[in-house]
Structures are given as C-alpha cells and as structure tokens.
Amino acid sequence: MNKNPYAWIEASLTTIHRADWYRSVQTINSLPGAVVLLSGQEVINFASNDYLGLAADESLKTSAIQAIQKFGTGSTGSRLLTGHRELHSELEQAIASTKQTEDAVVFSSGYLANLGTITALVGKRDLILSDQYNHSSLKNGAILSGATIIEYPHCDILALTAKLKQERQKYRRCLIITDSVFSMDGDLCPLPELLNLAEEFSCMLLIDEAHATGVMGKTGAGCVDHFGCTGRELIQIGTLSKALGSLGGYVAGSHQLIDFLRNRAPSWIYTTALSPADTAAALAAIKIVQQQPERRQRLWENVDYLKHLVTENLLNLTLNLTPNLKILPSQSPIFCFQLPDAATALTAGKKLKEAGIFAPAIRPPTVPTSRIRVTIMATHEKEHINKLVNSLKELIIDN
Ligand code: PMP
C-alpha cells in the first residue's frame, strides 16, 4: 500500500471551496470597539460579541494588568493542583450573586463549560432533547456524552412535548438543552414553558446564556432574569467572553450541582485554570454590569433604533424587490438577514465591507441558511447604525 493517507484532505478542501463554505481569518489590528482596523481598513464593527464595549474598557485592562503583576501570566496548573487563586473564588461568588444561585464554577471557555457539564450529567442510558439551532458546543457535548440525542424543531414546545411523552420513560435521566438567546438568529428560547415541561417530565434543563449574560434582564443576569424565572431549579451556562469582554465560561446552579461538576467535569478537572488576567477582567466586568445599568440601557436603545430603521426603510424594499431576503424578527442585539445561498451572502458581506461595514456572511455548516449577521453594541453611535441601514438598502436595491 503506497497510497498517501493524507490525500483525502486536499479533496475535502476542494469540496469546501466548491460549496462556498471555505473560511479564513481576518486580522483586526486595533483595540476592539465599534470601529476597528480590519486588514488595514477602518470599518464599523457589526460582527463583535462585545455587546457592552467592555473588551477595551480601562477598568478591565487595569484589573488584568494588576492580576498579571501579582500572580503572573499563566495559572500553571489545573484548579485542583496549582491553578486555583482566590480571584477564581471571587469571580465564582460574583457570578452566583448575579444569577442568584447557590454557587458557580468557572471554566477556561464557554465551549469547555458546555462539553464538561453535559458529559458529567448524562451517559449511555440517558436521553438528551436538543433544540435544532443549538450552538456547536451544546451539540458536541451531547455527542460526547454518549446519550441518545433527539433534536426537536426550533423552539417548538408542542413537538418537544410529543417527544417527551413518547420517549421519556425509556431512559434513566433526561436533559433538555437549549441556547437562551440563539446565537445566529437572535431569538429567545421559550424558557417558562421549558421549565414547566422539565418539571412535568422530570427532566434536567440546561440553558446556554452565552449571548444573554450582561445583556438580557433588568440586572443583566440573562434570560432567566428576563423571563422572571430567577430561583427556579435549572443549569445555567454562559461565557465571560462576550458582553463581559474577557475569556472563560461558567456554570451557575445549586451547591450540589457545582460540587458535582468540580468532581466529574473532565474539561474542568483536566485543563489549566483560567489565567489570572482573564479572571480579574471578568470580575471587573461583572461589577460594571451590576453598577452601570446605563451601559445595558444604551445597548437596548441602539437595538431599538436599528429595529425602527429596519421597519421604516427595509421591510417594504425586501417585500417588493428581493423576496429571497428574509429579515428575522430579533429579540436581542443579534439581527439576521437571511439570503438564498452562500454565494449571495458572501457577495453581500464583501459589498458591505467595501462600504466600510463589517457584517460578515455566515454560511452552512454553521447555520442551515446563509445570512448576514449583525450584532449591536452599546458603543455604536446612531450614525454607525444609519450607515449600516443605508448600506443594506443599497445592497437590496442592487440585487
Ligand atoms: N455558546 C454559545 C451560544 C456561543 O455562541 C458560544 C461562542 N460562540 C459559546 C457557547 C462558546 O463560548 P466561548 O467562546 O467562551 O468558548
């Protein structure tokens, strides 16, 4: 056998190119913010998850620098060996206090928090019910757990109820998993209904508050706060890397849940602890979220402003001129402009960039339908949003 065992990679790359699914990195050589330098070009940034504009905030930077000076750059080991600092406990207490849960634990990323928690909670004899639009980290956590996975249609409570009636009693444990704010569509999971179903069918419920943390609810605690479900028993996962402007993930819940994860979640036990700088920056961000509600207010004013402009300027155009473009109704700072195929989405993203707007095309396999995804930040000015809408309008007329 002299066949090159790596030859299939080239063939696979060719297939990816042909489908217009090829992705490559783009370099930002400036501080994060509403305006950034993208491959040397100044663009208005509608692609960032830094919803509150905290990633370049002075108090986060100062906290990170002080933590480096005091504790060094690396945490040198896993939490259970040499990696734990008091800062980690402070951050975990701050998260638990924001979420009003008994306890919380931080992971080195949101992705690892999902993988570790799902694999710790369920196994071969168990069932996972998963929203079809869930984030990759939930889907891969489910696969890794070895449980039976049933995907239910997006946010469809009736379909989920039918599946539970049919399947629940065949399995030992059952875990329902869902994004709370859907990362690519910007809509919300029906949390109160999910909680009721979880109770009725004796299921655990895990929600991923990655895009909700710092953004949703009166206190910025997430969708649990937004829906008035604080205090109900469930597993809340999130990230420190989006509105909190740092890096890392968290799980918030009961003492027993968190204690159990510290003993059973492999992606917490066997990985190096979150760095002192990231931990300190996240802690500073949580204090800002608690003490400066005006930032969140500014974000929502910008969201409402974009919604208003879209209704006034784009909805008629899309109906008349481009029946293939669908603007999804958003309940968050994430907006989705669906396009018929990957090639059209790529062209749209390119034209927007030429107009000085960074709002990238998102394509399969990340999402089932290609789109331009726009995220709003508290630090956007009205003129930035005007320019976005004008550029989208030109794009629609061009079509
Ligand atoms: N869940 C969702 C819904 C996400 O969008 C992301 C990040 N894209 C993650 C989890 C992973 O978080 P992190 O970037 O902290 O690994």
Image (cartoon, grey):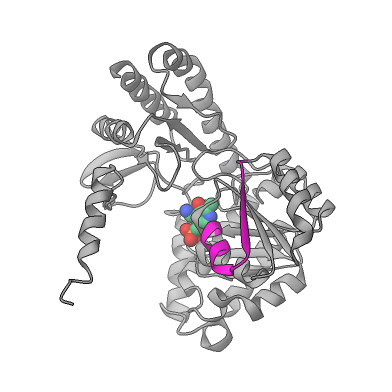
User: Can residue 161 be found in the magenta stretch?
Assistant: no
The residue at 75%/61% (across/down) is 170
Locate the C terminus and report the quarter of the image it occupies. top left
Q: Pick whichever, 59 or 19, lies toward us.
A: 19
**Segment colored magenta:** 138-154
Give the percent coordinates (x, y) of residue 155. Answer: 64, 40
Relative side of 233 to 38, left or right: right
The residue at 52%/38% (across/down) is 185
The residue at 46%/14% (across/down) is 319
Q: Is residue 180 visible?
A: yes
Q: Is residue 5 above or below residue 47?
A: below
Q: Pick whichever, 199 or 8, lies toward us.
A: 8
Q: Is residue 97 above or below residue 164?
A: below
Residue farthest along the right direction in this orientation: 200
User: Can residue 141 be found in the magenta stretch?
Assistant: yes
Residue farthest along the bottom direction in this orientation: 81
Give the percent coordinates (x, y) of residue 289. Answer: 60, 52
Q: Quadrant of residue 203 in the image?
A: bottom right
Relative side of 134 to 336, left or right: right
Locate the N terminus and report the quarter of the image it occupies. bottom left
Q: Is residue 358 above or below residue 196?
A: above
Residue farthest along the left direction in this orientation: 2
